[in-house]
Amino acid sequence: MITKIQSERFITLDVFRGLTIFLMLIVNTSGGGAVPYSPLEHAQWNGCTLTDLVFPSFLFAVGNAMPFSMKKFENQLQRKVLYKIFKRTLIIFLVGYLLTWYTTIHFVNGKPVFTPFTQTRIMAVLQRIALCYCFAALIAYYFSIRWVIIFSVILLFLYWLLLYGLGEPGMQYTITGNAVRQIDLSVLGERHMYREEGIVFDPEGLLSTIPATVNVLAGYLAGAFIIKKQKTYESVAKLAIAGSLLILTGVFWNYFLPMNKKLWTSSYVVYTTGIDLIAVSILFYAIEIKQWKTGINFFSVFGKNPLFIYVLSNLFLFFLILNVTPGKIFIDWINEVFFQKIAPGPFGSLLFAICFTLVCWSVGWLMDKKKIYIRI
């Protein structure tokens, strides 16, 4: 749905969402011709880079927006609320599935060819967002804040138990022996899964959706806390303290359960949530309390239409993979003849990503100027 009116909310949350989308576009569209800077690449397996913070932060941002929608649900019939939650889930999931199918386009003899639906990957970024939103929204709707916290802890320990108990003995945290892969192979089938370096494994698997839901719930709790405490030093301090404690917990847990984005381990959830809370506390202090204005409008443009801009960036992929010469697609050609000429190496790759991101931003800026915000 396209609306002309945006509901009131803290600018900090728009900026946080916008910053997340900005980083997501940067890391997703690095130019060819050079290896990107290491922070702009995912950890090969265990570990956590800047890039590995982006997706959980996006889920955290999804949760930030939920307290506002929950307020709207208070005076509505239960069946109407459930209809809205499931409708939003279905739309986001279908858009993600079609987008996944769309990005399988390749060219044969100069003609575009798509992978058949029977061989299309089922789970991906938007599909995970849809499922995590659905589970988190139902928990937040039916249970109190106290129980949301309890459920979050239970889900993290339950997932740890499932990873250890259902994985191959001695190989529970490896790419071939983990429970996430085994369940996806059994339920989805090899033809509907992602290939990780030649191995059939989906980093957005079904089982790992359980801990990813906690990232959304954490965002919901942070948003509800901000609404309750408003623009006070207490809210900033408590967010920062909670974030610091979670980071330390994640680092400690890492010794027993490695931080792993592709398995979305519980230690990874706790660690990334802690960083998100620290980031929100800093932004909240600067923007809401100190009234800092620099860069606010730039990032809030991304934050006001986050899902639309993300989908738009993926649709632009069609133009990036068009052949400009036999055997060479546009993204490789433009980097070779322009970006790598003026800035050889990783910086040229980064420069292309920034330019691509600014193109997407310009569309968001135009929509914001016309007060058009796409809501699902």
Image (cartoon, rainbow, N blue to C red):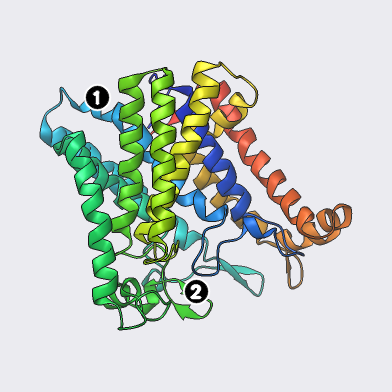
Above or below for 119 versus 222:
below
Q: Is residue 126 left or right of residue 25?
A: left
Q: Is residue 138 visible?
A: no
Residue at left offset 79%, top offset 54%:
348
The quadrant where residue 337 appears: bottom right
Q: Quadrant of the C terminus?
A: top left
Q: Which mark is residue 293?
A: none
Image location of residue 247, percent across then percent down: 44, 48
Precedes in sequence: disc 1 or disc 2: 1
Label 2 is placed on what type of residue? Glu
Disc 1 secondary structure class: helix
Disc 2 secondary structure class: strand
Image location of residue 282, percent across then percent down: 52, 30
Label 1 is placed on what type of residue? Lys
Residue at left offset 25%, top offset 59%:
157
Q: Nearer the viewer, residue 132 or 124?
A: 132
Q: Quadrant of the N terminus?
A: top left
Q: Nearer the viewer, residue 220 or 360?
A: 220
Q: Is residue 329 left or right of residue 48?
A: right
Image location of residue 20, percent across then percent down: 52, 42
Q: Is residue 6 left or right of residue 359?
A: left
Q: Which mark is residue 196?
A: 2
